[in-house]
Amino acid sequence: MAQDDDEKTMDQLNVEADIAADYLEGLLDIVDYEGDIELGVRNNRPMVQIVADDDSDIKHLIGRHGEVVDALQQLTRLAVQQKTGERSHLIVDVDGFLKRKRQHLRDVALDAVDEVRETGEPVNLKPMNSFERKVIHDVVREEGLKSRSHGEEPHRYVTVYMKAGNDE
C-alpha cells in the first residue's frame, strides 16, 4: 500500500519525522555529540534538523561539502523505511547547512540568469547532485528562463538558457 508523497497525510509525515528524530538521537548518543533535534514539515516533506549550542562537534556531522549530512540523510531515510515500509523523502539538516547551501545555489542560479540575459548565450554550471540541480531549476523557472540537466551521475550538470523564441 505504497503512497506517493503528495498523498501522505500530515500525521504520516509527523510519524516519519518522529522515527527519524529517534534514530538520529541514537546516533548522537553513540558518537557522544550534544545536539537538539527539531522537527517539522516543509513542502510536504518531513524535516529533521540537528542543532547545537557548541558547533565544534556538530560540524563533523556536516563534513566536507556536506558529504556527512548527505550520508546521515540516506541512513535516516532507510531507518524510516524499515519502520514504515514506505520510502521517505525526509530531509535531514545539520546546523542550518542546507539553508546556507540553498542560498549559495540561489546566488549561483541568479548569476547564471544574469549572464544569459546579458549575452543571450546558454550557461553551463558545474556538476551537481539532484538536490542542488532542483534548487537551480526552481530559481531559473522563477526568473522566467529555462534550464535543463545533462550528463550522467555524478557529472550531471545544469544548462541555463533563454526561453525559445518563435523562430527556434
Image: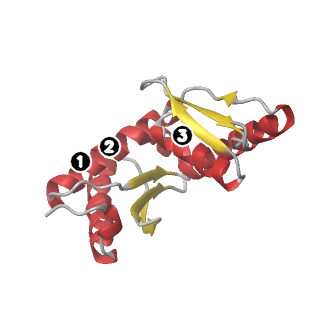
At horizontal 52% and vertical 34% (from top left) the residue drawn is: 149
Front: mark 3 or 2: 3
Q: Is residue 19 left or right of residue 56?
A: left
Q: Nearer the viewer, residue 144 or 62?
A: 144
On the image, the x and y values in percent for residue 154 come to 44, 25
Which residue, given by chain and number where applicable, does mark 1 sit on? 78
At horizontal 28% and vertical 61% (from top left) the residue drawn is: 4
In the picture, the disc for residue 133 is 3
**Mark 3 or 2, nearer chain start:** 2
Q: Amino acid at mark 2?
A: Gln
Q: Is residue 128 left or right of residue 119?
A: left
Query: Residue 45 falls in which quadrant of the image?
Result: bottom left
Q: Amino acid at mark 3?
A: Arg
**Mark 1 or 3, nearer chain start:** 1
In the picture, the disc for residue 74 is 2
Evaluate if marks 2 and 1 touch, with contact meaning CB atoms under 8 Å apart. Answer: yes
On the image, the x and y values in percent for residue 163 come to 69, 44
User: Is any part of residue 30 visible from this angle?
Assistant: no
On the image, the x and y values in percent for residue 34 come to 42, 53
Q: Residues within 10 Å of mark 3 (few under 14, many from 20)?
A: many
**What distance separates the C-alpha of mark 3 from that of mark 2?**
18 Å
